[in-house]
Image (spheres, rainbow, N blue to C red):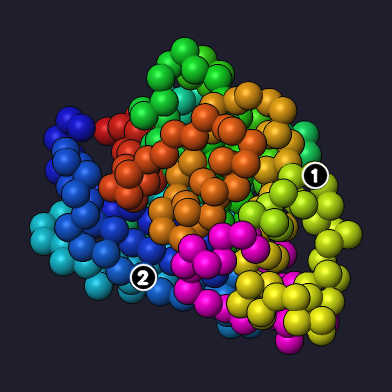
Amino acid sequence: MNHLKQFISCDWGTSNFRLRLVDAETLNVIAEHTSSTGVKKLYAAYKESNTTQSQTSYFVAYLKTQIKELPISGAMPKIVASGMATSSIGMVELPYVDMPINFTGDNLLSKEISEDGVTIVLISGAKTTADVMRGEEIQAIGLSKEIPTNKEGVLLLPGTHSKHVAFKNSVFTSFTTHMTGELFDVVSKNTILANSLEKADWNTNFESSFLEGVNKGLNNQHIASLFSIRANDLLSNKTNQENFYFLSGLLIGGELSYLKNSNQQVYIATTGILYTLYNLALSQINATVISFDADKIDKALLIGHKKTLETYV
């Protein structure tokens, strides 16, 4: 990367904030710092502060205080930021770029700003006619180096708001957002079903309950099946821990139901329990599943950040 030895990767979401000091050549993380001050919290503080600072300056000031937690010697490295940092409640609002976007990321919108001794490259999000994302597109670009250029399929980014990003011939063509994680949280904590659910560490004893839910979800029966969780509890058909995984299966199955007859290659970028559950669910539709190892998933954002930063050095 020309003369640049290090850069700072900033992943600024709605609820969380993460900085990583990165070796530009190897993408090894030299140091990391996180906080719970996402853009939502900082924007609220800005609105309440009655400061004469601009919104951009207020965000830059916070960023600088957090950079002090990194072991930087010499000149300040360039910072590259994605996620909600470029939203209307972030540092600088940038418009969403229309899909499709290239695997190279060269048609994303980015902007370099310099203020108070720091230089920041900000990256916009992407949109379709009915959906938007900020941040996940950078992860997708970072993972694209592991996808053969002549392939067609879908990249799954499971999470609170799971993203399904379709691709063909080195281009991300469209995407959809599935609120699976958030729906699970709301249903399990804030509905009549809450008392019929108990969180438990995964083990294979829960597999049959999970897959029962998955198959109902795959057949678009997840809404009609929700109250059966309450009945399962009252009639002692299932334990509350089994109900917990039945609910997970219902929602994940509903999320994946559109893939049932598609024969698409499915690339899935997650690890741990989420990988186990999504892989099990996908096995019910005989999908061709390609996974990424944990290191590649962890470095995906850094690869995407580096690709963008390269256009400014």
Res. 141 image quadrant: top left
How crowded pointer 1 is (Cα within 10 Å; few <14, some 14-19, many 20+) is rated as some
Type of amino acid under label 1: Asn
How crowded pointer 2 is (Cα within 10 Å; few <14, some 14-19, many 20+) is rated as some
Above or below, comparing residue 92 to residue 148 in the picture? below
Residue 206 in sight from this viewpoint? yes
Quadrant containing the C terminus is top left
Image x and y of residue 70, in percent: 22, 67
Res. 182 image quadrant: bottom right
Image x and y of residue 203, in percent: 47, 67
Disc 2 secondary structure class: strand
Image x and y of residue 57, in percent: 47, 64
Above or below, comparing residue 13 to residue 147 in the picture? below
Toward the viewer: 3 or 234? 234
Structural distance between the alpha carbons of marks 2 and 1: 41 Å
- Tell me the tag on residue 219: 1
Q: In the image, which residues are magenta? A: 183-210
Residue at x 88%, y 59% (from the top left corner): 224
Type of amino acid under label 2: Thr
Sequence-first tag of 2 and 1:
2
Residue at x 75%, y 51% (from the top left corner): 217
- Tell me the tag on residue 34: 2
Assess whether residue 194 is covered by the magenta stretch.
yes
- Magenta segment, prevailing SS (helix, strand or loop): helix
Toward the viewer: 156 or 119? 156
Residue at x 59%, y 33% (from the top left corner): 286
Q: For the view shown, which residue lies furthest in the right direction? A: 224
